Structure formats: structure tokens, C-alpha cells
Amino acid sequence: MQPKAVARTHTLSFSPAMRAALIGLMALTLVILQTVMAYAKPESLAPLAEKISPSVVNITTSTLVEGRTGPRGIVPEGSPFEDFFREFQDRDRGDDDGAPSPRRSSALGSGFVISEDGYVVTNNHVIDGADEITIEFFSGKELVATVIGTDPNTDIALLKVEADQPLPFVKFGNSDAARVGDWVVAMGNPLGQGFSVSAGIVSARNRALSGTYDDYIQTDAAINRGNSGGPLFDMDGAVIGVNTAILSPNGGSIGIGFSMASNVVSRVVDQLKEFGETRRGWLGVRIQDVTQDVADAMGLQEAKGALITDVPEGPAKVAGLKTGDVILSFDGVDVGDTRGLVRQVGNSAVGATVRVTVLREGKSQTIAVTLGRREDSGSDATPEDEGTPDASEAPDVSSLLGLTVTQLTDDMRQELGASADMEGLAVTAVTEGSEAFEKGLRVGDILTEAGQQKIAVIADLDARIQAARDAGRKSLLLLVRRAGDPRFVALTLDEE
């Protein structure tokens, strides 16, 4: 009888110190592996490029322009090239009268499909003025596009093509989630060379160029002419920006490109799709940032908020907002500066009633304002109806704070382009090198308020200066108007 096999289990025994050391080593190894995985670059962007390429398009526009007259080049008389240029010049003449023939001008750009039924996003400047727009897909197929709507303020245009089958498309991502240092991919038609991919990182956020609603992502992914309107992707293949502009001394990419943030673009696209135009909220105030010297002059603890410089006819005036109010919050969101407020108001719904918290004469109060529509707004303020000083009396002249001022007369109002009922003091001289001169005050400016109180005569200004000193303030806030445009300036008070 054969003996039975006996299964034996060998058990290794470790001392408590050895077990603790082993556990620590395993934990350290795990941390290192996680760190390497988090920071490792992808081996290749090819899978991502293959996934998103079918939704990116080349855009060709054609515009009929008037023919040119005159030589197409500057050639000395008797030059051997004279006949050559004359031949091309003669081709411009479309009839026996020598009238120039109209010609077609072409331009190139990029775009991307955002829905299977053929909506395409691009830059407004790519298609502006075009009478023919052709969309070329990655497959080589071409379709004619129509313009659904445009928004010059954000340089965004929405196009539409009709296809016989659903089109590949991409979705917008959350641009607010993009961090400086995140990898991004730009796609488009640079310099007319066809579909091209470039990669880089997010270099900066919240860049402003020149527009009221600017919110650009800065990237070092190569962007050149022809990339305009193309998408900027994150590593998940979501569009987080529309490539719009580059900063370059030579016209080529030097690694500073700007893409309009997708959270701005998506709101614009939704409105263009629904209305064929944008419909932005409108508060109806002129504002400026609260600088530190302005904050000191107003007795504010922090230099933040938006200072109202004028309230023309509109929603704010109806609601009771006033010049000199500092807007601290809008619809429950704190206001840091004017740029943030403008963007928030623009993103609000037309007709919505919002709560605006302002600081007025040192006290906080909340006012309900029903927003109008920015696109329907007027731009000029209507001066308040107040008494006009007697022009027959000789005005007083005084030199204060580096300024020489005099009471307004009818002749001065006409000369300075002021309304007939405006009250204030006209600046007749500014001491060079003074704080007033350095802050931009010039002859012809009109002072209408001092210390957030209206002034009509020099005695009013004297009283405001004394009141500021009595309150222990080191500067005085002046409301200055130039060609009707208001702004606040804080000037340091001399010690008595």
C-alpha cells in the first residue's frame, strides 16, 4: 500500500520590526508609482488625433471685390519689366472703357463641427464679408455653408451645412477647469497647408486682448494664420477654446497664442442657434475700477468693486443706482473689478431681476434691477436737469490741488462740448509735474463732483476739501468729465 502524499505549507515568520519595514517599503513603492503615473506624458497623441480629426474642418471663403486700377507694381519707365506689368494691368480692364473688372478674393481658416446635423463654429473674422463659404472635411468632402449668426464682440460665428448623413462632432468642455500647465492640442489649417496638429500646454488663463467680453486661454501650442476658428482640445478630446489670435512680431507662431474660452463660446453659440444673434444682459452704468487711491479717498478698506461714474437712461437709473455708488456684488457674486462685472452682466438673461449690492455714502444697500438688453441699449448719458449759473457774472478763478479752475459759463460749455445745463468747474491750467498732471487731468476737463457731492462754484470745491480733511482723509475723489465721458480721480490733499 502506497503512502499518502502529505501537503505541507511553509510559513515564513517575520519579527514585528521586519513586518513594519516591509509595509513601509510597499507604501513608498506605491507612492512612487502613483507619482510617476500622474506626471508621465502620453507616449503618443495619435489616438487622440485620430479620434477628433474628423470633426475639424478647413474653411475657404470667397468675396467679390472691386477691380483695381493703376499699375500692380512700381516699375521705372523704360524698364524691361514694363511690358510685363502692362500685360497684367490690361487684364484688369473688363470693358472697352477701361473700367476695372471685379475679382474674387479668397481666404482660409478653420472650424469644427459641434452637432451631427451640421452646425460649425469658427471665428467671425474668418467669414466676415464672405459671399461664399466652403467647408472641407477631413475626408476631403466639401459642403457649402450658410451663416446662422455672428458675434463680433467675441469673434465667434456659427455656420450650418446640410449633409446626407450624420456628421462626426465634438463637444465643448469646461474651460474653467483648465489649469496652467495642462496639456492641450490645437488643430486647424495653418497657412493653408491643410489639416495639422500641434501640442503644448495652457500657459495662462483669463487673458484679455481688446474686447469687452474677452476670456482667453493662452497656449504655446503652435497657432499660425489659417488656424483661426479651429479648436483647442484638452486630453479628453473636449473643446476648451477657439483659436483666435497670436502675439507675434513676424506673423508666425512664437509660442504665444490665444483661444477664446469654451464657456464663453458655448453661451454665444446657444444664443446664435436660438435667436440668430446675441442677447446679453444690460445694467446701464458706466464704471471704473476702484484703485487704492480711490479707495482711500472714499474711506474704503479694500480696493475692490466697480465704481459707477455715470448712470444714463436705462435699467440702473430706473432702479435707483447713482453716480458714485460702488457695486460690491451682482446677483449674489462678489465684484472684484469692472471686467468681472461686465462679463457677469453680459452672461445674465435679458429681463432677469437681479440684486445689486452697492456702497453709498459709507453704507451698504441692496437694489433690485431688471436687466435690459445690451444690443438695444443707448450709449449716451442724459445730464440731470439742474439750474444753470448766471453767465453774466464773472466767474471766480482758483488754484487747488495743482489745478486752476473756474466756474462754467455758457461760452465755455459750448466750447468744451458740454450740455447747456451741466454744472461744474472747468480746468483752465494744470501744473506740470503735479499729481493731477500725472493722473491725466488736462485743460478743458470739467469737474462735476468732489467728495461724491455735486459742485457748481469754487466755494463748493473748497467745502469738499475741508470736509475731507475734517474726516481725516488724505485724498479727495473728483468726478472728471472730458467730452462727456466721466471718470473718477483721487488727488492727495496737502496738509494744512
Image: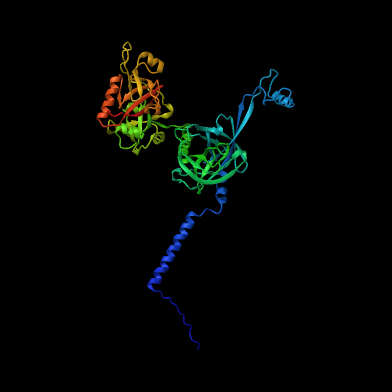
- Residue 356, image quadrant: top left
Residue 28 in view of the camera? yes
Classify residue 168 as left or right of residue 362: right
Viewer-proximal residue among 137 and 284: 284
In the rendered image, residue 466, in percent from the top left (x then y), is placed at 26, 26
The C terminus appears in which quarter of the rendering? top left
Which sits in the foreground, 18 or 399? 399
Which residue reaches farthest left? 470
At horizontal 35% and vertical 17% (from top left) the residue drawn is: 408
Image coords of residue 141 (percent x, y): 62, 40
Q: Quadrant of residue 56?
A: top right
Left or right of 232? Residue 417 is left
189 left or right of 483 in image: right
How far from the left and from the top, in percent, is residue 9?
45, 78
Between 273 and 192, the one lying in front of the other is: 192
Residue at the outermost bottom position:
1
Q: Count the marks: how many?
A: 0
The scheme the figure's colours follow is rainbow
The x and y percentages for residue 30 are 45, 62
Tell me if I can see residue 353 in this picture.
Answer: no
The residue at the point 42 percent across, 32 percent down is: 280
Q: Is residue 387 above or below residue 254?
A: above
